[in-house]
């Protein structure tokens, strides 16, 4: 039968799997051969019928949901993992900026302390260490009036080893403050007073050593007190107690 | 159809859900087993998604998993046994169809849908699956070859034999009505 080689190609032709050259040749043959055309039509009809008959079963909505949940179950975990990573990153960033903040603060404090140490040393080295020479707190305190933008109370030193040598106006970061010089057994201690908000000190409370000096600092009544001296830490602590007591009185 | 190239497993796999279920039902021939089959397929595929090569045919990959899962099930093994028996009878099937009249014209009548469905159901597994993949899923020969893991030539000959077998079966049914 002359059409046999064509008929063997019909399925591939209708499935769209024939190379384009063979496709064109078969096209040409179909235009001239009613028998093959009828065969092709019948095959197309069978194809269509199988598609319709074969598309028969549909899954239930419940089953679809069940599978959806099953495979989506991985997602929240991945999400929470993603969130955990994000949170960890945020924490790291925050920690990083906190560390940087503290480092900056620390650096600033170091600057302040070294500046104050310089002031303390220059006061001791000066031929006129104090502008107001007086051991009387009632003389020293009024002398500062109008020279600095704040006022303060000084302790009564009777029955103590401390002596008030006097005071001077000083500047820290362009802010005016008071420097009081006390003496205890040949050791001189500078007590600096600045408005709290003008000076960037951290919240230190215990005595530390800065540049071989003992340092004690605290805030009281809106003022930052910083004590510098080579006296023993106990002496500084005692003087601090006296000053704190006076500030509260 | 161009296979999706990338996406999450859910994005790629859920659009195939209805088709996969239909195919599973045709293989397993009952709802309960079909659901088990689909569920197992999705679980396996999700687990193995890491090994899926992006850019390769995801649909064929899913159908392959489904089919292998079925072939490993009890009813799958049973169906596969019938397959090997039928392979030997191909010559007869083709001989039976060549001189018979083509019954397709009658199929236009919607009343014969159930006959066709019955004929499909009765087809041996290896015929049924290639016919469904070709006509229902509209897979290319290459996709079918990828799915059932045989060369393209085998896909073509199997398709041809499957169609012939279906025609014979239909003729017999039509004569009976």
Image: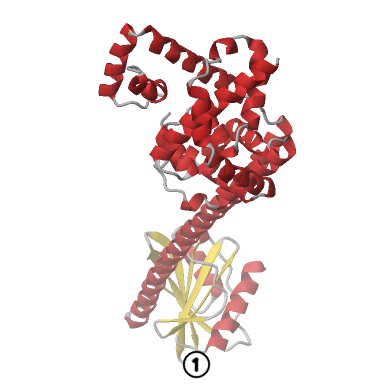
**Quadrant in the rendering for residue B57:** top left
Q: Which residue is nearer to you in this view: A154 or A72?
A: A72
At a point 60% along the width and 47% down the height, the residue shown is B71
Given residues B177 and A86, the one toward you in this image is B177
- Whether residue B163 is visible, yes or no, is no
Residue position for label 1: A185
Q: Position of residue B89 (x, y in %)?
A: 54, 38
Picture quarter with the N terminus of chain B = top left
Vertical placement of A44 versus A246: above or below?
A: above
Q: Residue A201 location, x and y as percent?
A: 48, 66
- Res B23 quadrant in image: top right
In the displayed structure, would residue A76 be above or below residue A177?
above
Q: Residue at x 49, y 56 (%)?
A: A89
Q: Is residue A242 above or below residue B117?
A: below
Q: Chain of mark 1?
A: A
* CA neighbours of label 1 inside 10 A, class few (<14), some (14 to 19), many (20+): few
User: Which residue sits furthest bottom?
Assistant: A185
Which residue is painted at 46% across and 45% down in the image? B149
Quick one: B26 or B37, which is closer to the camera? B26
Residue B5 position (above or below residue A82): above
- Is A222 left or right of A65, judged from the image as shown? left
What colour scheme governs how the chains and residues are painted in the rendered image of this protein?
A: secondary structure
> What x and y, as percent, mark residue B48?
53, 52
* Image quadrant occupied by the C terminus of chain B: top right
B7 left or right of B111? left
Residue B95 appears in the figure: yes
Q: Secondary structure at mark 1?
A: loop
Residue at (64% x, 49% y) in the render: B77
Q: Is residue B134 left or right of residue B40?
A: left
């Amino acid at each position: 039968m002359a059409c046999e080689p064509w008929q063997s190609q019909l399925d591939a032709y209708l499935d769209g799997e024939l190379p384009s050259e063979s496709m064109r040749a078969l096209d040409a043959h179909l235009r001239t051969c009613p028998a093959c055309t009828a065969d092709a039509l019948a095959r197309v009809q069978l194809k269509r019928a199988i598609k319709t008959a074969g598309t028969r079963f549909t899954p239930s909505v419940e089953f679809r949901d069940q599978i959806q949940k099953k495979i989506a179950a991985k997602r929240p975990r991945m999400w929470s993992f993603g969130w955990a990573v994000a949170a960890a990153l945020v924490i790291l960033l925050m920690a990083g900026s906190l560390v940087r903040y503290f480092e900056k603060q620390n650096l600033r404090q170091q600057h302040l302390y070294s500046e104050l140490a310089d002031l303390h040393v220059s006061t001791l080295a000066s031929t006129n260490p104090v502008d107001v020479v007086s051991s009387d707190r009632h003389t020293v305190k009024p002398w500062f009036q109008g020279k600095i933008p704040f006022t303060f109370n000084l302790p009564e030193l009777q029955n103590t080893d401390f002596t008030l040598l006097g005071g001077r106006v000083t500047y820290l970061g362009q802010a005016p403050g008071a420097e009081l010089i006390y003496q205890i057994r040949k050791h001189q201690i500078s007590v600096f007073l600045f408005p709290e908000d003008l000076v960037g000190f951290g919240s230190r409370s215990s005595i530390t050593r800065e540049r071989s000096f003992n340092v004690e600092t605290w805030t009281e009544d809106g003022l930052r007190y910083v004590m510098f001296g080579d006296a023993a830490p106990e002496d500084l602590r005692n003087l601090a107690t006296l000053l704190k007591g006076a500030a509260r009185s | 159809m161009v296979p999706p190239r990338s996406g999450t497993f859910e994005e790629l796999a859920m659009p195939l859900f209805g088709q996969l279920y239909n195919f599973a039902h045709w293989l397993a021939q009952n709802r309960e087993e079909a659901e088990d089959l689909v569920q197992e397929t999705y679980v396996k595929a999700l687990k193995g998604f890491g090994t899926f090569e992006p850019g390769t045919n995801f649909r064929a990959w899913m159908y392959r998993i489904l089919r292998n899962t079925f072939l490993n099930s009890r009813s799958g093994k049973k169906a596969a046994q019938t397959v090997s028996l039928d392979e030997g009878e191909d010559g007869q099937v083709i001989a039976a169809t060549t001189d018979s009249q083509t019954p397709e014209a009658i199929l236009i009548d919607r009343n014969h849908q159930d006959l066709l469905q019955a004929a499909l159901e009765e087809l041996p597994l290896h015929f049924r699956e290639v016919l469904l993949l070709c006509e229902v899923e509209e897979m290319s020969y290459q996709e079918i070859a990828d799915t059932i893991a045989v060369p393209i030539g085998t896909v073509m000959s199997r398709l041809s034999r499957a169609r012939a077998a279906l025609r014979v079966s239909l003729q017999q049914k039509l004569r009976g009505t």
